[in-house]
Amino acid sequence: MGWQGSDPSTDFRGGRFISLENLIFFAMKYPDSFQRLLHKQDGTRAEWEYPFAVAGINISFMLAQMLDLQAGLPSSLSGIRFLKLLEEDEMAFDILFCVAFQMMDAQWLAKRASYMEFNDVLRSTRTQLERELGLEDIFSVKDLPAYNMLR
């Protein structure tokens, strides 16, 4: 699955337990998308790909930062919009994780990225996700344009 060492628990330091929950949710809710990403089945892949599990942990961490989840009340536009999405669907964070992972992989392929460009791809994923969350006609995570990439 793309762990950095022999003990996967050490990889969860940055993303904590929620990143494990996100990966499990993704595998159960969208198994086709999960398997396609896990096995890198879409597009022309780089010789040196991103490690799947560690990418998921980084995406969870990126979402927590982007949405101001550490703050008592979010101050960013994305965080404020996310609270409204969460009111509509208690699984909004988990679904947003799946959307972000699929989005990150699509950008990975579009940029023909290699392992050393992972952080750049993650930053551009965040930018695209913030843009989509800022759209006026978004009332649930499933309204995001990138949601349609999930299978």
Image (tube, rainbow, N blue to C red):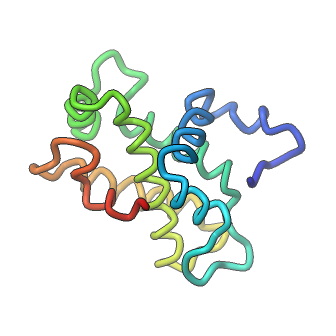
**What is the x, y in percent for residue 108?**
53, 70
Above or below, comparing residue 74 to residue 33 in the picture: above
Q: Quadrant of residue 63?
A: top left
Quadrant showing the C terminus: bottom left
For residue 99, side relative to residue 16 (left or right): left
**Image-based side of 135 in relation to 26, left or right:** left
Q: Quadrant of residue 89?
A: top left
Q: Residue furthest left?
A: 136
Residue 105: percent from left, percent from top:
51, 65
Q: As drawn, is 98 to the left or to the right of 51? A: left
Which residue: 59% across, 42% down? Answer: 23
Q: Nearer the viewer, residue 31 or 101?
A: 31
What residue appears at the point 67 percent right and 48 percent down from the top-left corner? 54
Residue that extends furthest to the bottom in the rendered view of this protein: 44
Q: Position of residue 73 (x, y in %)?
A: 28, 19
- Name which residue lies at 59% across and 63% down: 37
Residue 50: x and y in percent read 67, 63
